[in-house]
Amino acid sequence: MLAIVIGVTSITLTGAFALVSVAMYEVQLAAFEDSLRLVADAEAEWIGARDEVAVSDLPGPVANDVGPLAKFAVVYDGDGRVLASTFLGPAPVRPTETEDGGFFDVWDQGERLRGLLLPVAGRPGFAVLVAAPRTDIDGDRRLLGQAMLGAFVVALVSATVMSIWIVRRVTRRQARIATVARRVAAGDLAARIGAHAGAPEEVQLARDVDGMIDRLERLVTSQRRFIAHAAHELRSPLTTLYGEISHALRRPRDAEGYREAIASALVSARELRDLAEDLLTLVRIGVDRRKDSEVFPLERCVAAVVAQLSGVAEAAGVKIETVGRAHPVRGRERDIGRMLRNLLENAVRYSPAGGRIELRVVDRGAAVTLEVLDAGPGVDPADRERIFEPFQRGTERAAAAGSGCGLGLTIAREIAAAHGGTLEIVDPEPPWSACFRATLKGSWQDEGVGPEAA
């Protein structure tokens, strides 16, 4: 990158200085030739006005502030013979290729001159060659070239130093970002770029990368915690199952003894099955959810879930009541049903005997709200977010009210999020002690159906 910058700078500076040098030389040469033409016109007029052919003593062209230059002149007749000359050496042969009055170079004893051939008025065939040294112009050109070369070197060195400084300044932050990225890839999630002074774009990039690492660290930490909790939850029923089977095989038993051992082992196996299903559900949520997504009447889903839990609620001495009319939503009906079932099972588990659970369905225009209210022990404000974490069962008082593997609310929130909604705990009005509110997007507006379709 640095080589490219220096190369482009060199080419640009070379072209710029070359153009300036040529332009300045052309300006000087044009001014010199204009002055020389005036002198040649005056010389040709002077010779034409005299009977005797001779070179005048008129001054030469003015090319600098010192004074007029030396004038060299030659008068030719129609046959090209030299009639008069002020050249120090032999007079040049009358040029034929410049009879149109163009400028050309001639030499006199090794000195380079700039000349102009003009016809003499009143003397047919006669012509006068007027020339002047171009030493000043050539000297100025060399001096200008040397000055431009020096300026080019200084500019190139300055541009190179500045480019190196800029590139190092830019790449230093990039190198730090690359170093942090390699450390993170190696497993060091504590690596950070940190906020430093610099260009706004660099500072923003550093903050974005640090934010990404923070999210990655939280994700990895959550994953590790989830794995540890899952292993712990799996170990308990596995240990119980292993113990029951080992104890049953330790000594001979009658049929009733084996039946009791198998029944106890079956309870642990059922817990393992339920936990495995919850884990698989948690992993599956959000994966290709659009594949089976459809618009369905939420009222049908609510009625099915309430019917499924009627036996459990009756056994616990709890009554489930549904309030409000459901409207169509888009999503997986099976997943939405699972979310409702988890919320209602949680409410049944913590509700006192003889209690009541209310399921409210509220149309809020662009969304449908499902609220599950119960009169159980409630949720401590400090635990309102923690109970949605995997394998959390709330406070000890609430956890003692029932069993469960601690994934129900986690699954419910993930289902709501996968459908573009939310699940939260809000402050209920009396006599309720807990209110879980799920908000789902209503789909009747963009699907061409209305609430009456429910």
Image: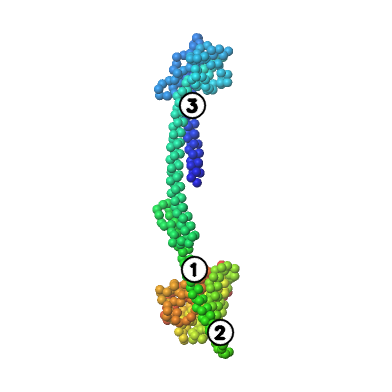
Nearest to the eye among marks 3 and 1: give it.
1
Question: What percent of the width, then of the height, locates residue 424?
Answer: 46, 72
C-alpha separation, residue under disc 3 versus residue under disc 2 = 119 Å
Residue depicted at x 51% and y 86%: 315
Residue depicted at x 50% and y 73%: 231
Amino acid carrying label 1: it is: Gln
**Label 2 neighbourhood size at 10 Å, few (<14), some (14-19), many (20+)?**
few
Q: Do the residues labelled 3 and 2 touch (CB within 8 Å)?
A: no
Is residue 25 depicted above or below 266 in this figure? above
Residue that numbered label 3 is attached to = 30
Residue that numbered label 2 is attached to = 249
Q: Do the residues labelled 1 and 2 touch (CB within 8 Å)?
A: no
Nearest to the eye among marks 1 and 2: give it.
2
Drawn side of residue 235 relative to residue 64, left or right? right
N-terminal label among 3 and 2:
3
Residue that numbered label 1 is attached to = 223
